[in-house]
Image: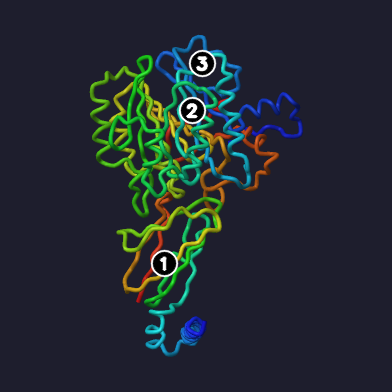
Amino acid sequence: MNRIAVLRAIGLLSAAMALCGTGAAMAADVASSSGAAYQVAIQNFAFAPKTLTVPVGTRITWTNRDEEPHVVVSAGALFTSSKALDSGDTYTVTFSKPGTYAYYCSIHPMMVGTIIVQ
Amino acid sequence: MQDIHDEAAGGRRQFLKCMAWAGAGTLWLMKSGVLHAQPLDGSHVGKDAAFSFVQISDSHIGFHKAPNPDVVGTLRRSLAMIAAEPTRPAFVLHTGDLTHLSKPEEFDTLAGLIQEARLGRTFFVPGEHDVIGDNGAEFFRRFGERQQAGGWYSFDQNGVHFVGLINVLNLHAGGLGSLGTEQLAWLKKDLAGLSAETPVVVFAHMPLWPLYPQWGWGTDDSAEALGYLRRFGSVTVLNGHIHQIQQKVEGNMTFYTARSTAYPQPAPGDGPGPGPLQSVSAQALHRYLGIRDVRHVRIGRALAITDEVLA
C-alpha cells in the first residue's frame, strides 16, 4: 500500500512538473517508472490529435468515440496492435523508447496518426 | 437526386413497398448476357431470364446500436424474402461484413441464419469487419471457397463467369482497399482463356472504383483489375461496404454497390465521416431504407452515370 501510494505521489509530482514546465530531466527519469498520460480520441474516422509529441515513458490511451469499430496498428509493427475497439473501448500503450511511431486503423487504413516520442 | 417516399401519404401499400427494401437484398436477373437488378419484393417473375441470383451485403452481426438494435431480425427478414421468391435464385451472394467484429459467436449466428433459411448455394467474400485480428482465418475456415490460398475464386453459371475478389486484407497505412500483386496475377490468368463474349460478374466487398476515397470507399489497385476486364462485352461489378446503392456505367462495365441488411450510411461526403446513420430512429429505419436514392458521383472528368432507381 505504501509503495503504491509513493508511486502515485511520484506520478502526480511528475505530472505537476510537466505542467509547470520545470524539472524536465527529472520528469523524464521518473516517467520511465510512472509515466505521463495522454489521450487520443478516435472520432469521425480520424485520430485526434493526429500527431502527438510526448516524452519517453508516456502512456497513450486511444478511446474509440465512433459507433464503428477501429483497430490501432503500428506501421512496421513497432508496438503491439490493439484488438478491435468497439464503441467506448480503449487501448493503452506505454512508449519507452524515443522514435517516430506511425500508426493506422487496419480496417479503415485512410485513418493515420503519428506518435513522436522524445 | 433523390426520390423520397412521401411519408405523410404512405398507406399500407406504400409501407409494404418500403418494407420490401428494408434490409433486403437485390435480385439479379441474367438476360441475354446482361444483368438486370430488381428489388427483392417477390413481385418479379423472371420468365425471360436465363437465371437469377440474389446479392445481400453488410449484415454486421454483432452491431446492436442505433439505428438498428436488431440486425439479426433484419437479416432474417431478408433471407425470408429470398426464400419467398417465385423463381428460386441459382445462388445467394454475400458481399462481406457478415459480422461487425469478426467474433466467433457472430460468425456462428450468421451461419445459423443462413442454414435456417435453406437458401441452397451461397458464396461469400469477406469485408474488413470479418478479418479483424486473424487476417480472415476464421472467415475463410467457415465461408471460404478454398480454390486459392489467398481466398479469391471464380466459378461459372449458365455461361457467365463469376469472380470473387478479396480487397480487405494487407491494407496499407493511408491507403484504400487492396487486391495485391498475387491476386491481380491470378485474375489476369483466370480471365485469359475466356472469349470476349463471356459475360463476367466480379464481386468484392469494397468498391472497385474510386467512389469516395476520402472516406476510404475505393480500392488502390482496382484500375489494374478493371484493365483486364475491359475487353469483355458485359462486365458487372458488385460491391458492398457503403450501405447504399450507388451505380455507375463506364463503357461495358456496370458498377453497383448494395444496401446493407443492417443499417444505412450517409451519402458520400454528407457529414464528417461514414458510419451508421444514427439519426434514423429504429421505428423509421424501414421507411428510411425505402428511400430510393441515386446520386451522381463525379470522379475527375465526367463519366456516364446511370440515374435510375432500382424499384
* Chain to which mark 3 belongs: B
Residue under label 1, please give it: A93
* Chain to which mark 1 belongs: A
Q: Of discs 2 and 3, which sits in the foreground?
A: 3
The image quarter containing residue B159 is top left
Q: Which amino acid does label 1 sit on?
A: Val
Residue depicted at x 37% and y 77% = A56
From the top left corner, tell me how far across and down residue B279 is, in percent.
Answer: 65, 47
* Chain to which mark 2 belongs: B
Q: Of discs 3 and 1, which sits in the foreground?
A: 1
Vertical arrangement, residue B308 with respect to residue B266, above or below: above
Q: Earlier in the sequence, mark 2 or mark 3?
A: 2
Vertical arrangement, residue A74 with respect to residue B44, above or below: below
Label 2 packing within 10 angstroms: few (<14), some (14-19), many (20+): many
From the top left corner, tell me how far across and down residue B233 is, in percent.
Answer: 34, 21
Secondary structure found at label 1: strand
Residue under label 3, please give it: B88
